[in-house]
Image (spheres, rainbow, N blue to C red):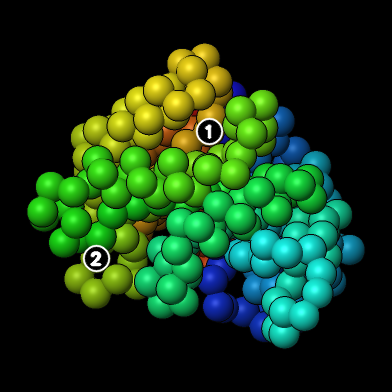
Amino acid sequence: MKTYIVGNWKLNFTVGESSIYLHKLLKSLPNYRDTEVVVAPSLIALQPLSLQIDRHKVKLAAQNGFYRDYGAFTGEVSFSQLRGLVDYAIIGHSERRYILREDDKMVAKKVAAAIRNKVTPILCIGETESERAFGETADVIRDQLIGGLSEVADDDLHKVIIAYEPVWAISSTKAAKIATPDEISEVVKMIRKVLGETYGEKPAENVPILFGGSVNASNAGAYLTVPGVNGLLIGGSSLILNEFTDIIETAKRVRA
Ligand code: 13P
């Protein structure tokens, strides 16, 4: 399986800054066959960046997309409009769940819309600090996974990527903590178990699972060697070019 290194730029960089960053990133990267490098810029930058990108080196992801393809939905952008511009889309990120009140039902419709439009969904799931403290992690993971995948046909499971992002480990979260490889390993096992029970063991094994939460160049190696982890979803550190390229180099080294 490929290793995925995905940079989520969140609400950062103007279109010009995004273009300069991409230019430098493309210059610094050789073609990586086994490492899929992806960046998720702001929506407004996707169109110009799609003309600039060399897809052999880097792919584009949207940070969101709407679940209907067209119609009276002021302010929304659909996956049918994103189709062809991006290869991936981050869906159900905790910032959208908790700040913008997206629930599993909406997340499920977005996952289905992405697949329908040939965009690979990166479905984000993860427990909050209090859910973990109350011993609810397994339930939250199960609910978000089954809920988010509820509109995916069995045959389409291989079109989905899961990202485990414990909300308490995301750097913008107040007093973010660093997740340990053991904590991550335990949840990745839960995810594969739920997928296995729902879709069968073999299809479950083939779903890429990424980890996200305060990943940087110093801890990327440890996270990438957690059994069952197939890549990383990186926020803050992906905004610093050297840090991001160091993580890509680490991925190439540890997973060679
Ligand atoms: P940080 O890497 O800044 O903790 O963000 C993680 C994240 O939310 C990526 O989607």
| Location of residue 38 in the rendering, given as x and y in whole percent from the top left corner | 65, 51
Amino acid type at mark 1: Pro
Amino acid type at mark 2: Ala
Q: Is mark 1 within 8 Å of ligand 1?
A: no
Q: Mark 1 or mark 2: which is in front?
A: 1
Quadrant for residue 49, please give it. bottom right
Residue in front for this viewpoint, 52 or 160: 160
Q: Residues within 10 Å of mark 2 (few under 14, many from 20)?
A: some
Q: In terms of sequence position, does the residue under pointer 1 or pointer 2 come before the other?
A: 2
Residue in front for this viewpoint, 163 or 36: 163
Side of 16 where 81 appears, left or right: right
Q: Residues within 10 Å of mark 1 (few under 14, many from 20)?
A: many
Q: Residue at 19% across / 56% down in the picture?
A: 131
Q: Residue furthest left?
A: 134
Side of 107 where 164 appears, left or right: left
Can the viewer see residue 18?
Answer: no
Query: Mark number for residue 208?
Result: 1
| Location of residue 25 in the rendering, given as x and y in whole percent from the top left corner | 69, 58
Residue in front for this viewpoint, 227 or 198: 198
In the image, residue 62 above or below residue 188: below
- The residue carrying mark 2 is 176
In the image, residue 199 above or below residue 160: above
Residue in front for this viewpoint, 111 or 172: 111
Q: Residue at 83% across / 65% down in the picture?
A: 81
Q: Is mark 2 within 8 Å of ligand 1?
A: yes
